[in-house]
Image (cartoon, rainbow, N blue to C red):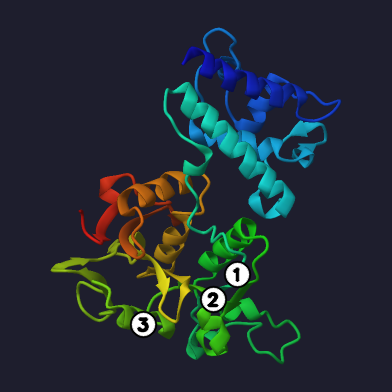
Amino acid sequence: MVDSGRALAQRLRSLRDRQWPDTRVTQPQLARALDVSVPLISSWESPTAPKVPPVNRLEAYATLFCTIRSLRDGSPALLPDHELDPDELQTREDLRQELLTLRAAALGQVVSVSETVRNPWDFGDDKPVTLVCGRLPQELLDRMPYVKPHDPDYIELYTYADLDALFELHGHIRAFNPSSEVRRHTPNELVPDDLTTHLVLLGGVDWNELTTNVIHQLGLPVRQINDWDASAGPYFEAGSERHHPRLRDDGELLEDVALFYRGPNPLNRKRTLTICNGMYGRGTLGAVRALTDSRFRDRNAAYVRDRFGDKKSFALLTRVSILNGLVVTPDWTEEESRLHEWPGNP
């Protein structure tokens, strides 16, 4: 185990010293890029008593050293996913798998590269992906600028509901599936061929009628009840339990409830269907970010793999906390974030 730890330490040192020709990254430079201390970098590279970095730090190494473009003005910095080209993304994934395998060996675990967790948004077949997002109702569009096609400043995306979730997920799917055509539509823009791709439905049953139809067709044990006029408000129903969002007395959203579903596309069993659906838009964004946020996506993907195994279909109802108006990515490894799971425990 000591030798395995040294193997990881040596590899980390070699990335810093020899990854790029004629360029050496110093420990202080690397510490700034990773937002850690210099002694911590030194402990990871120690030739005698190396410390094992956490997974997220090794992922940051992979992102940093996958491209020389990480050097900006002579100082290394992490590039966001959408700035990496397909070759750089592949280099990052190869490096990530190498480092995680070395980490597992350092901890005395037996893990092969093939067992590293694959992100559920990596469809792995280069087939088209269609994202379907609800269209804002006309009464809202009538109050907005730039949403009429004849307007010289017309902006098509302004007509989409759940735009935060769409923007977050579109770039992520493009990055993980560089050879796939990724389309986005509102329900009324769809043609039959769109429905037989990998299909991703964003948003709830109010404005995305396709979500309503699909949930009904699938017979999921989770229902979204849009009882907006009742004193308790709308909710998700799972079995005999009702799960409501939490709002302050002044109407500010404190916690949303969101559904994540993955299964075969009922219109083409060789493709997938995914639903990310909150009571409010920030719940939808939280369901998306559970598997896109670089700090949580791997642990959540690992939870999905360990919890549902080779199940072809599964659903997870999750809390989505809102802090100062900002969405906090749910951590599915924490029991309190999970409200309902289907199928149930074995």
Residue 243's x, y, as percent?
A: 23, 65
Image-quadrant location for residue 66? top right
Which residue does the image show at 63% across and 33% down from the upper left? 61
Image check: 161 left or right of 319? right
| 94 vs 131: above or below | above
| Dot 3 alpha-carbon crowd within 10 angstroms: few under 14, some 14 to 19, many 20 or more | some
Q: Do the numbered discs 2 and 3 sit on residues whose CB atoms are within 8 Å?
A: no
User: Which of the marked residues, 2 or 3, is nearer the chain's N terminus?
Assistant: 2
> Which sits earlier in the primary sequence, circle 1 or circle 2?
1
Residue flagged by tag 3: what amino acid is it? Thr
Q: CA distance from mark 2 to mark 3?
A: 19 Å
Where disc 3 sits, the SS reads helix
The residue shown at (60%, 69%) is 127
Camera-nearest label, 1 or 3: 1
Label 1 secondary element: loop
Discs 1, 2 touching: Cβ within 8 Å = yes
CB atoms of marks 1 and 3 within 8 Å: no
Q: Position of residue 87 (x, y in %)?
A: 73, 50
Amino acid at circle 1 = Lys
Callout 2, which amino acid?
Answer: Thr
Which label's residue is closer to the chain start, 1 or 3? 1
- Give residue 197's mark: 2
In the rendered structure, the answer to whether residue 261 lies left or right of residue 219 reads right
Task: Name the residue located 32 percent from the left edge and 60 percent from the top edge.
Answer: 316
Report the residue marked by disc 3. Answer: 212
What is the C-alpha distance between the residues marked 1 and 2? 7 Å
Question: Closer to the camera, 204 or 201?
Answer: 201
Residue at the right extreme of this rendering:
22
Residue 127: image tag: 1
Image coords of residue 144 (percent x, y):
58, 82
